[in-house]
């Protein structure tokens, strides 16, 4: 396990709620945030300012992306459009005194380089994973496949965070078949605000508790 205390937030798909969950974790743990690979800046400001604002983070608790691309594509494809190849040497885990929350790009099998996917980056950074999932139809299959891919590489999974309308049946089956924990839930909101993130952060277990659970 890395000497840096922290987690890697990944998801079963893109646009699934990783950024919101990252903001909640940063608020709950007074953590530092890092999104190493940002794409889609042609359409939006990116996830870093979103997490900063939602979690109310001091600028000292924000680490800028190692790479920031314009196109809303996987890092490999977005980098190709700008004639940039991601250098693994720049994707080194920052050492900070606080807990570090690292947010991935898309799901596990998203290409970063010709020889690297997000799951390879997770394995190399050596942080335990928080897996963000949809709460509704199809999530059992996607979540169990993601858990299997992580475990095949020996990546510890702290647990799953379902996002969307409550679905106790899906949560039960994911926890049972995936041999994992539901860490907390993110229900549907009309608007996501700093107040909402602050409220949800109160339901997040401490990182120490989560690490004890997976070591048992």
Image (tube, helix red, strand yellow):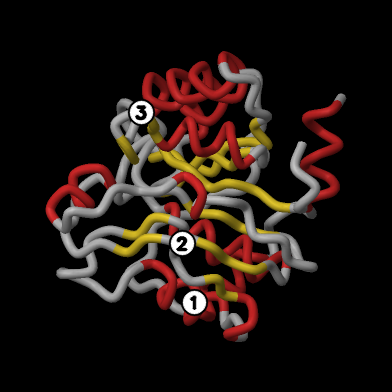
Q: Earlier in the sequence, mark 2 or mark 3?
A: 2
**Marks 2 and 3 in Cβ contact (< 8 Å):** no
Q: Is residue 12 left or right of residue 98?
A: left
Q: Which residue shows up at 54% across the image and 37% down it?
A: 122
Which of label 2 and label 3 is nearer to you? 3
Q: Earlier in the sequence, mark 3 or mark 1?
A: 1
Q: Which residue is mark 3?
A: 115
Quarter containing the N terminus: top right
Which of label 3 and label 1 is nearer to you? 3
Q: Secondary structure at mark 2?
A: helix
Q: Between residues 139 and 25, which one lies in front from this camera angle?
A: 25
What is the count of numbered marks?
A: 3
Quarter containing the C terminus: top right
Q: Is residue 140 above or below residue 7?
A: above
- Residue 62 image position (x, y, % from top left): 56, 75
**Marks 1 and 2 in Cβ contact (< 8 Å):** yes
Q: Which residue is mark 1?
A: 54
Q: Secondary structure at mark 1?
A: helix
Q: Which residue shows up at 58% across the image and 51% down it?
A: 92
Alpha carbon separation for disc pair 2 and 3: 29 Å
Q: Which residue is mark 2?
A: 20
Alpha carbon separation for disc pair 3 and 1: 34 Å
């Amino acid at each position: 396990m890395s000497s840096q205390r922290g987690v890697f937030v990944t998801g079963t798909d893109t646009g699934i709620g990783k950024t919101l969950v990252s903001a909640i974790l940063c608020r709950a743990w007074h953590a530092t945030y890092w999104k190493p690979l940002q794409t889609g800046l042609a359409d939006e400001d990116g996830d870093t300012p979103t997490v900063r604002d939602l979690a109310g983070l001091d600028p000292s608790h924000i680490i800028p992306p190692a790479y920031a691309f314009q196109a809303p594509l996987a890092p490999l494809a977005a980098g190709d459009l700008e004639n940039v190849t991601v250098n693994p040497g720049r994707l080194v885990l920052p050492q900070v005194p606080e807990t570090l929350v690292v947010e991935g790009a898309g799901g596990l099998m998203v290409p970063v380089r010709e020889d690297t996917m997000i799951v390879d980056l997770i394995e190399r950074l050596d942080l335990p994973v928080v897996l963000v999932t949809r709460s509704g139809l199809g999530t059992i299959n996607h979540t169990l496949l993601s858990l299997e891919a992580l475990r095949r590489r020996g990546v510890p999974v702290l647990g799953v965070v379902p996002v969307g309308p409550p679905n106790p049946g899906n949560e039960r089956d994911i926890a049972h078949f995936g041999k994992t924990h539901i860490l907390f839930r993110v229900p549907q909101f009309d608007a996501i605000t700093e107040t909402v993130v602050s409220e949800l952060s109160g339901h997040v277990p401490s990182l120490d508790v989560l690490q004890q659970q997976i070591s048992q």
